[in-house]
Image (cartoon, rainbow, N blue to C red):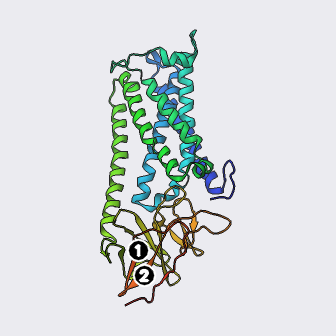
Amino acid sequence: MSTGYVAVQWSRHKRLYDASVAIGIAIYLGAFVGVSKAFWAGEHGISDEVILIRALGSCAIVLLHIILCIGPLARLDPRFIPILYNRRHLGVITFLVALAHATVAVGYYHGFGVLNPFRSLLTSNTNFSSLRAFPFEILGLLALLIMFLMAATSHDFWLKNLSASTWKRLHMLVYFAYGLLIGHVALGALQADRGSIGPALMFSGLCIVSGLHIAAGLKEYRKDRGAGTLVVDAGEWVDVGAPDEIPTDRARTVCAPKGERIAVFRSAGSISAVTNICAHQGGPIGEGKVIDGCITCPWHGWQYRPQDGCSPPPFKEKIATYQVRIVGGRVQVNARPLPPGTPTTPALASGGLS
């Protein structure tokens, strides 16, 4: 969160994160090149350029699988949240590795003819009706363009000015890019590879990504069905539970009749409710905690005051709030959201209406 924009808000954590990723990529590329040169030696030797193309391409795909797994892993186990914190950095690095792969590949296969390399890429193979001769390079190019859009808009400037919902929809295209890359590899490298290791690895990666997303979705579904399902007073108020069932400085998340998730926090002897969606990247506010009197999103640390949903000065972000009351020793939250930044009167955890 910032009142202005700088290229990168570096911190020790981010430097360590990016340095670790860079070292990991260097180790992967070195190992891939070394093993490939040892395996494909002699009369079966492969040129250094082709080995580098394969190393960069496979590295980008591995990184993309990691990116797609971070989200559901963080939903399944909060210990993965620190990795989620700098996922955008990892996305930009993945795009740069993919761009290097594309640059070397286009230069090697299309850079020595009379046509412009990019024009040659687009026109040298137009056999779209053949599965075996399909121009798989086009799929990779489309995926790279999507990754470029995501990398170019990864900064908070774009998140703020595009709006969180528009930015989120744009970055959800990563799944479309992933599908394009699956097709790019399946119709390209895997058709030339007669072994079974490559297809097995790609299929395993697809199963892991799909399985983690399904498991995270089922967990969220069970959570929504198990919390706050009792509606009272003509459907306007949702039962949350007894005050002491809400952890101190933490929240209990309930689901309103129309599906909106509401985070009900107990802190300093009072109970307040806000939307479960962070204004930054839609992070789960209800999985955060109250720090220095402010609700803190677990994803990137954005903060909001419980009583009005406003970020502390000088920040100006706001989230929706909800009315809260205690009736018969039970916490109840009104299912109708108030406009972002609307002050509310917290309910006292030690008492209420009877």
Farthest residue to the front: give it.
234
Residue found 35% across the figure and 41% down from its top: 206
Residue 99, horizontal then vertical, whole percent: 56, 31
- Residue 122 vertical placement versus 92 (above, below): above
What label sits on residue 325 in the rendered view?
A: 2
Instruction: Judge whether 219 appears above or below 240 on screen.
Output: above
Residue 36 image offset from top left, x and y in percent: 47, 27
Query: In the rendered image, which quarter contains the C terminus?
Result: bottom left
- Which residue is tagged 1? 334
Image coordinates for residue 94, horizontal then vertical, percent: 53, 39
Q: Amino acid at mark 2?
A: Arg
Q: Is residue 178 left or right of residue 117?
A: left
Question: What residue is drawn where x is 56% and y is 24%?
Answer: 104
Q: Amino acid at mark 1?
A: Asn
Residue 35 seen: no
| Few, some or many residues within 10 Å of mark 2 (<14, 14–19, 20+) | many
How many numbered callouts?
2
The image quadrant of residue 246 is bottom left
Q: How far apart are labels 2 and 1 at the CA level? A: 8 Å
